[in-house]
């Protein structure tokens, strides 16, 4: 009976590891994630003189709060013309995450 439980637990562990390896829109590490990604908005040929950021936070993957929208980042820096946008993610064990949108523009 103990061997059967051990096999079931091992299969559950392998299955959970395989599921976390599935493709996602953002690269995610199971233990730690720190990435910066380009946005699909703007024209990188434009010069910029201002940088605005907006953040949201996630705790234990259960509670999330904040406004990380492009609009919030533009408002925070007084940007009216967007050159480009980037996103960054800092996440530790899924317990604490910070998601930041950075807008470059004038």
Image: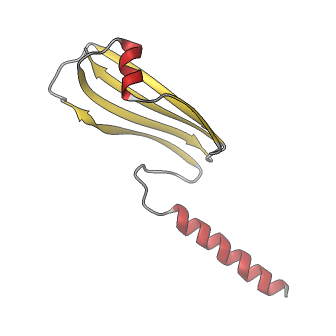
Q: Position of residue 12 (x, y in %)?
A: 67, 73
Q: Is residue 63 left or right of residue 51?
A: right
Residue 84, placed above or below residue 29: above
Quadrant occupied by the N terminus: bottom right
Q: Is residue 84 left or right of residue 33?
A: left
In the image shown, does 34 or 55 lie closer to the viewer? Answer: 55
Farthest-out residue, left: 45
Question: Which image quadrant for residue 82?
Answer: top left
Q: Position of residue 11 (x, y in %)?
A: 66, 77
Q: Position of residue 36 (x, y in %)?
A: 40, 38
Q: Position of residue 69 (x, y in %)?
A: 41, 29
Seen at 52% across and 51% down, the residue is 29
Q: Is residue 24 left or right of residue 49?
A: right
Seen at 56% across and 46% down, the residue is 32
Seen at 37% across and 24% down, the residue is 71
Quadrant occupied by the C terminus: top left
Seen at 79% across and 81% down, the residue is 5
Residue 87, placed above or below residue 61: above
- The image shows a total of numbered marks equal to 0
Residue 20, placed above or below residue 46: below
Question: Which image quadrant for residue 24?
Answer: bottom left
Describe the colour scheme in one phrase: secondary structure
Question: Which image quadrant for residue 45?
Answer: top left
Q: Is residue 24 left or right of residue 86?
A: right
């Amino acid at each position: 009976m103990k061997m059967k439980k051990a096999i079931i637990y091992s299969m559950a562990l392998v299955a959970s590891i395989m599921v976390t390896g599935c493709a996602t829109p953002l690269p995610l590490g199971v233990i730690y994630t720190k990435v910066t990604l380009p946005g699909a908005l703007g024209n990188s040929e434009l010069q910029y003189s201002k940088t605005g950021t907006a953040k949201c936070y996630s705790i234990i993957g259960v509670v999330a709060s904040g406004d990380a929208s492009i609009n919030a980042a533009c408002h925070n820096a007084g940007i009216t013309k967007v050159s480009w946008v980037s996103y960054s993610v800092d996440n530790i064990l899924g317990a604490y995450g910070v998601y930041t949108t950075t807008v470059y523009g004038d």
